[in-house]
Image: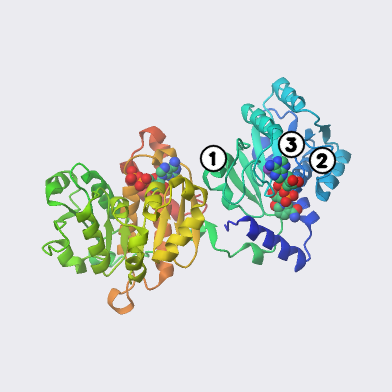
Amino acid sequence: MRVVDINEMKEIEKVAIEEYGFTESLIIENVGTRGADFIEDSILEELDYVGEIVLLVGRGNNAADGLAISRNLVNRGHRVRAFILFPDDDQSSEEQQKQVHLAKSYGVRINEVKNINQVQSYFEETQDSYVVIDAVLGTGFKLPLSQYLFELFNCVNNSKSITIAVDIPSGITANIGAKSSVAISADFTLAIGLPKTGHYIDEGARHSGQVLTLDVGFPKALISGGDKALLTSDVIGHTFGARNKFAHKNTFGHTLVVGGSPGLTGACIMASNGALKVGTGLVTAATWKESYYELTGRSLPEVMTGLIPSSAKDKESIINELDRYDAVVIGPGLGVNETSRDIVIELLSQFAGPVVVDADAIKVLDLSKDSELLHTRKYPTIFTPHMGEFAKFTGASVDEVLQRPIDYLKEVVDRTNSCFIMKGPCSFLGFPNGNVFINYYPNDGMATGGSGDVLAGILGGLLAQNPLDRNQSGIFMDKTMLYQAICLGVGAHTVAGKIAAKKYGVRAMTATSIIEHLSDAFQELNEDDIY
Ligand SMILES: NC(=O)C1=CN([C@@H]2O[C@H](COP(=O)(O)OP(=O)(O)OC[C@H]3O[C@@H](n4cnc5c(N)ncnc54)[C@H](O)[C@@H]3O)[C@@H](O)[C@H]2O)[C@@H](O)CC1
Ligand SMILES: Nc1ncnc2c1ncn2[C@@H]1O[C@H](COP(=O)(O)OP(=O)(O)O)[C@@H](O)[C@H]1O
Ligand SMILES: [K+]
């Protein structure tokens, strides 16, 4: 599913109207019927008792959409009370005014709000659980918020209602998901036509609840394509890594995981185990001399072990035999110091294959210093930073990155010609072909030490299983295959986390339980509609 910013949405609307002859009224009419279908089938059906549905009406087309939905709900036998929040001003859009008129004729009860107390006392007096439709502000919202709306939104948020936002929760900006003092906290958001970037960023993600997209009839040619999409099963696809029953272990590649300083060998082990459980033929974990026995004492017997040289110049160890490996993961528990930096640079320069750069390996690099090395590297480089690591790498602050994650992501991908997975409750995947995928599956069970190490291992394991002949075609010269492997890795990690949370609960699940459920995740990924 494509995701758009406001300019892209406006462009789609403009072309639909000017070139296809679609009209604004048709859009609103479709929002009305589709929105009412959804609210009736998915929300009202589940409730034991449906009292009066409350509609909060602003001035623009977002309000027009909400009114059209309400009119359809009344037509199906439900009761709706609309609070017109700005009854006396002349700023209401033409469509809003038309829809107020229509709603009135269809039997929506209209309350013109002169004073916020009117709404507050209504909410206080209504003891039933009720449904609120938020059609105050949509994509036309501009910061800041008035005191009047501040009080209104607090009143809604403090009630026990089920809140459905039309297009975007009021008070959230549609591009970057920013809010001012307060925004409507929705349980569901009905995205009109396509989801907006603001649904998945920062406060926008926290306030949108479950985002459902209403098909309002825009021509398919206009709503497909674009450079941003949700990571869903159709994107992940099932083509990557087709297996061959007659294969031998070398067919499925050899992953080298480099990391694990004293006290942090677990990170290296979890990454190695992650690589092992995605079908890699062989996995080697390499660590420093000082942590070697700690590592061997804790790793699985299937994992081979090796040594990181004590300096990049010392060619005695893994650096000397990089040809044996098909993919490298570097960073989990590696330690942040000059020697680590030397090793990371050496590996990136010497290894002729895909490298997953994670955790401490990201921390020892620096965009301004290292972009040239990264940009000229001939083989795929995949960075897996969380927000803090991403910000440090770029020299920006976490707050700056949080506010414009997609812009930052695209810029860094461009400057390094590398793939980036900016990790968090919502992860953003950026590829050098300009595409961005949004992996939106909040699961607080994943916020546990080691879950990132597991992801790095999964990616390294999948990237080693290169179906192309390395000598003939060059590793992953077919970039589509590379991007598919990364999407599959992120998808499998997310689904395994979802299953682990179901089995153990979000408190008791650990990073190891993500690895344990990779097998179920791959099975689920072969079915449709996983997300
Ligand atoms: N052509 C259409 O009918 C379409 C309608 N859509 C709907 O229309 C919405 C966008 O419509 P509009 O552009 O009219 O924008 P809005 O419905 O968001 O409203 C803009 C109005 O709100 C006021 N406003 C902005 N910031 C405010 C603030 N801080 N405090 C108080 N008032 C404020 C503005 O002065 C303006 O009058 C979308 O969110 C969606 O719901 C779109 O989804 C797609 C196409
Ligand atoms: N609330 C959350 N919802 C969904 N996924 C999450 C959440 N918190 C963390 N994750 C995922 O868990 C992983 C954490 O990685 P990272 O921060 O590197 O942890 P660690 O360093 O402990 O391994 C990432 O893949 C991230 O997307
Ligand atoms: K809204």
- Colouring of the image: rainbow
Q: Does 191 sit above or below residue 237?
A: above
Residue 98, visible in the rendered structure = yes
Q: Does 480 sit above or below residue 195?
A: below
The residue pinned by badge 2 equals 75
Give the number of the mark in front: 2 or 1: 1
Query: Element at badge 3?
Result: strand
Badge 3: few (under 14), some or many (20 or more) residues near its Cα, within 10 Å?
many
Query: Element at badge 1?
Result: helix
The residue most toward the right is 105
Q: Earlier in the sequence, mark 1 or mark 3?
A: 3
Tell me the amino acid under the disc marked 3.
Leu
Q: Is residue 229 left or right of residue 10?
A: left
Badge 1: few (under 14), some or many (20 or more) residues near its Cα, within 10 Å?
some
Tell me the amino acid under the disc marked 2.
Asn
Q: Which mark is residue 206?
A: 1
Measure the C-alpha gap from mark 3 to mark 2: 19 Å
* Quadrant of residue 80 within the rendered picture: top right
The residue pinned by badge 3 equals 56
Task: Give the residue at x 21% y 48%.
Answer: 260
Q: Nearer the viewer, residue 481 or 197?
A: 197
Residue 36, visible in the rendered structure = no
Query: Element at badge 2?
Result: helix
